[in-house]
Amino acid sequence: MPRQIALLRGVNLGPHKQVKMAALREVLTAAGYEDVRTLVNSGNVVLTSRKKPATVEKEVHQLILDELGVDTEVMVRTRDELADVIERCPYPEADERPKHVHVAFLKGDVDEERVAKLQAMDFGDEAFEISGRELFAWHPRGLADSDLAKQLQKGAGADATSRNWNTVTKLLKLADD
């Protein structure tokens, strides 16, 4: 059966939107998802289901809302889509400096006007590229001092959730286990 990765947006970052990963695994397993695994405490779930990713997105969102009382966006990619994301990374530095490369998994279309404004801005040695349903960002000085990250937090017109390169590659390994 196909492996899928569900990425929850903005959970466990502060006192709000708290989702315990053990409870999340229990809820998803009880709903019929198989081999449910989580990675770290920031809403990364690998599961098995024959359902379409769009269906998984809707169901997982509703389950988290109904059973755990948290309203959060969910972005789903299949195992093969995640492998493709890794192949498409435009930054060869990713494996050597994985905390400096982030991938925003988009849900929906970007605002072309907003993206054009971002592309016209000078971010020095920082860069970003949209490829498919992902936005790749290179932050060579880290996120704390990143002007690009501050602008990207304002959005590109689509709901998104970001993960650093370490997490992205670990999710693929978890999906392959």
Image: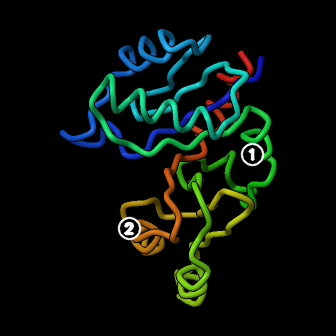
79 lies left or right of 25: right
Apparent side of residue 131 relative to residue 38 in the rendered image (left or right): right
Is label 2 in a helix, a strand or a loop? loop
The label number, if any, that marks residue 145 in the structure image: 2
User: Which is nearer the eye, 61 or 11?
Assistant: 61
* Cα distance in 3D space between marks 2 and 1: 25 Å
Please name the amino acid that badge 1 sits on. Ile
Quarter containing the N terminus: top right
Compare marks 2 and 1 and give the one earlier in the sequence. 1
The amino acid type, in three-letter code, at marker 2 is Asp
Q: Quadrant of residue 138?
A: bottom right
Indicate whether 102 appears above or below 3.
below
Q: Position of residue 7 (x, y in %)?
A: 52, 38
**In percent of the image, x 53 and y 64: which residue is there?**
158
Q: Which residue is mark 1?
A: 86
Position of residue 28 relative to residue 129, above or below, is above
Q: Position of residue 149 (x, y in %)?
A: 45, 67
**Residue under the point 46% across and 59% down:** 142
Query: Is 16 left, or right, of 24 in this rendering?
Result: left
Task: Locate residue 116: give its quadrant.
Answer: bottom right
Q: Nearer the viewer, residue 109 or 174?
A: 109
71 lies above or below 109: above
Q: Where does the image place residue 64, in percent across and percent down from the top left?
A: 38, 29
Mark 2 vs 1: CB contact within 8 A: no
Q: How many marks?
A: 2
Mark 2 crowdedness (10 Å alpha carbons): few <14, some 14-19, many ≥20: few
